[in-house]
Structure formats: C-alpha cells, structure tokens
Image (spheres, helix red, strand yellow):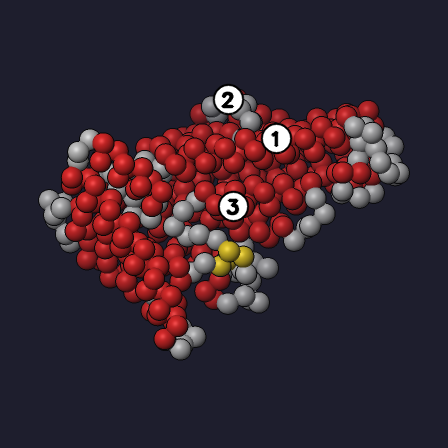
C-alpha cells in the first residue's frame, strides 16, 4: 500500500482525496470564523453555543447568522440523501463536489461588507454536501469537516495497535493521523502549519522508538498481548523506560516531542475559535492517557501470566538506536532547537507565501 492510496478501495475512499477534503474544510471553517463574524461553517456544535451567547447578548445579527448557518448545513445533508436516492450513477459523489467549488469561487468575489448571514449559510450548505458525500477513507468512516472524531479514532487505533492484538488498526491509525494533520494545516494558519510539520518529525521519532521497543517486548514474551505480560521492569528495565517514553510522547505528555506539536495545534485551534474541539481534544487525550498507562503499568509492574521466552534485557548495542531516538524525543520536547525551528518557520513562511 502506498502513502496516499490503496488500489483495492474506490477512488472516493482514497487517502489523498480524504486528506485534501479535510484540509479544505478546515481552511474554509477558519475563514468563516475569522472573516465572517466568528461563525463556523462546519462546526455546528460551536454555532449552537455561539447562538446561545448571541441570544443572551440580544445580538440579533449574530443569532441570525448562526441560525441560518445551522439550517443551511442541515438542508445540505438532506439534499445528499435525496440526490443519492434519485440519481442512479456511480459518479454521483463527483456532482456533490460542485456546490462547494462554485460557492467558494463566488465567495471570493463577494465584498466583505455583505452581511455574513448571506454568505456563511451558503458555504455551510456546500460543506454539508461535501461532508455527507465523502464519508469513508479506505473503507473506514471519517469526517472531513471536523477533526475531533478523527483525532479520537487515531489515538484509539494507535493504542489498539500497540497494546492489543488487532494489527489491522495500523492502517486506521495512519489514515486518521493524516486527517488530523490535514485539518491542522487548513484550520490553524501559521500555528497549525508549524504544528503539522513539527508533528511529522516528532511522530517519526516516536513511532520508530515505539516500534523498536515493541520488538524488544515481543522478543522477551514471545507475543504482543499486554494483558499476559508482567514484571517487565525487572526483566528489561531499559526497554521498559524506552517504551514508557514512547507512550508518553504518543499521548502528548509535556517534555516529550509530540507535546510541542499538540500544543501548537491547541493554539491554532483556539486562535480560529475551535473551542469545542479543543475541549473534546483535551478530554480524549486524558482518557487515552489513563487507558494507555493502565496497560503500561500492568505490563511493567504486574505479575506475568505466561511464559517469559527471553528472560533478560537486550544488549547495550541493540538498545543504542532506541536510546538515541529517546534522547531526540526529549530534546525536541524540552529545548527549542534554534536551527530546526528556523528551518520549520521558513518552510511555514514559504508555504504561506510570506517570503518573497
């Protein structure tokens, strides 16, 4: 399977298309929030809260903007159901991309002084049509207009892959991770773009350490079922520490590399008004943190429930690459490496057209 596609799936379910749609939805949502009266074209949960706030402040224009957006988004979802029912074509999803394409082209020529309740609902309608038409990535359900669900599924899938027996979760974890990064690129402006690039680097180090330390553990116990492991801290203390560092980084514990990228995603999301997503993101990470460390604690400090195949630590030579990866994860999590930050910021500026 390639990075962006798998030939056994429909083109409408390809990873590259899902990533592109998620990026564009994040960008559009950020545009309407920043430029069009702090209204989310896709995030209707946020609009309900904003509507309540406008109602409390007797802000009629704000209420009208959020209410019409909510209604337009709902109508877009209904239209897709009717369209799919009566249009008997294998290419019906292609036609469902036309509304958001033409709407975005038209909005680009609309003066900013045009009332937002004329503009945002139309965009919300187009995003709803896009969202309902493309709902699978390589056979798995996803959402191209929001990121919270994709984030939750990515973290849960990584957890199942490392701590469970269902290795098919690897593909799901990678797919959902791509979607979260794409949404961050679209929604977060400079913060989101920096976070996405940094996350790719941090994730490469962390995943490499997680895979290698998991290999050590599988060699020790002869299997990867953590529910049957125990006493790992006594058998292989270095491997235990290295695996613990990988787990800490994966769930975004401070002082580890992925925390930096997740922090910048938080900043980008807050800057663009994604308060609900931030709250749900934090809750999801807390839940996954508790679940992951419960398994880690059981495997490291509990009693083994099966035969230990290799009852000793790996040699220092075998662990040296893992130790180097762990050091890199901590360095990028604790220190600001000026040369690297400059490189990433220059890349961000080039991608945003800030450098001439």
Instruction: Give the crowd class for mark 1: few <14, some 14-19, many >=20 residues within 10 Å.
Output: few
Name the residue beneath numbered marker 1.
290
> Percent position (x, y) of residue 330?
58, 25
* Vertical position of residue 82 compared to residue 239: above or below: below
Q: Nearer the viewer, residue 123 or 9?
A: 123
What distance separates the C-alpha of mark 2 from that of mark 1? 26 Å
Circle nearer the N terminus (2, 1): 1
User: In front of the other: label 2 or label 1?
Assistant: 1
> Percent position (x, y) of residue 269?
37, 36
Circle nearer the N terminus (1, 3): 3
**Quadrant the N terminus occupies:** bottom right
Name the residue beneath numbered marker 2.
335
Residue 272 appears in the figure: no
Quarter of the rendering containing residue 271: top left
Residue at (38, 50) in percent of width and height: 145
**Quadrant the C terminus occupies:** top left
Left or right of 127? Residue 207 is right
Disc 1 secondary structure class = helix
Circle nearer the N terminus (2, 3): 3
> Percent position (x, y) of residue 172?
57, 51
Instruction: Give the crowd class for mark 3: few <14, some 14-19, many >=20 residues within 10 Å.
Output: many
Residue 115 appears in the figure: yes
Name the residue beneath numbered marker 3.
177
For the residues labelled 2 and 1, say whether their Cβ atoms are less than 8 Å apart: no
> Percent position (x, y) of residue 168?
65, 53
Residue at (50, 33) in percent of width and height: 283
Residue at (49, 37) in percent of width and height: 199
User: In front of the other: label 1 or label 3?
Assistant: 1
Query: Can you name the residue that lies furthest to the bottom here?
Result: 88
Left or right of 67? Residue 92 is right
Disc 3 secondary structure class = helix
What distance separates the C-alpha of mark 2 from that of mark 3? 25 Å
């Amino acid at each position: 399977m390639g990075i962006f596609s798998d030939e056994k799936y429909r083109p409408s379910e390809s990873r590259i298309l899902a990533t592109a749609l998620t990026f564009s939805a994040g960008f559009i949502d950020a545009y309407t929030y920043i430029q069009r009266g702090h209204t989310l074209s896709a995030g209707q949960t946020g609009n309900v809260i904003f509507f309540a706030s406008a109602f409390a402040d007797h802000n009629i224009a704000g209420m009208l903007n959020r209410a019409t957006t909510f209604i337009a988004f709902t109508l877009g979802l209904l239209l897709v159901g009717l369209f799919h029912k009566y249009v008997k074509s294998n290419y019906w999803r292609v036609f469902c991309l036309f509304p958001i394409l033409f709407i975005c082209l038209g909005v680009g020529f609309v003066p900013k002084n045009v009332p937002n309740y004329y503009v945002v609902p139309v965009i919300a309608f187009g995003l709803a049509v896009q969202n309902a038409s493309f709902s699978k990535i390589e056979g798995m359900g996803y959402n191209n207009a929001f990121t919270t669900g994709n984030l939750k599924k990515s973290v849960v899938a990584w957890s199942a892959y490392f701590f469970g027996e269902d290795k098919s979760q690897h593909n799901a974890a990678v797919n959902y991770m791509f979607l979260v990064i794409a949404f961050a690129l679209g929604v977060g402006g400079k913060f989101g773009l920096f976070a996405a690039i940094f996350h790719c680097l941090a994730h490469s180090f962390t995943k490499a350490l997680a895979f290698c330390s998991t290999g050590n553990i599988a060699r020790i116990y002869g299997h990867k079922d953590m529910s049957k492991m125990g006493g790992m801290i006594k058998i292989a203390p270095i491997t235990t520490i290295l695996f613990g560092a990988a787990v800490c980084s994966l769930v975004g514990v401070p002082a580890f590399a992925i925390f930096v990228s997740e922090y910048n995603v938080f900043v980008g999301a807050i800057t663009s008004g994604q308060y609900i997503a931030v709250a749900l993101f934090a809750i999801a990470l807390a839940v996954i943190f508790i679940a992951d460390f419960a398994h880690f604690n059981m495997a490291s400090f509990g009693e083994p429930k099966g035969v230990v195949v290799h009852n000793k630590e790996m040699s220092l030579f075998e662990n040296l690459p893992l130790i180097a990866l762990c050091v890199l994860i901590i360095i990028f999590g604790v220190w600001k490496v000026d040369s690297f930050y400059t490189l990433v910021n220059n890349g961000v500026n080039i991608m945003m057209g800030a450098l001439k």
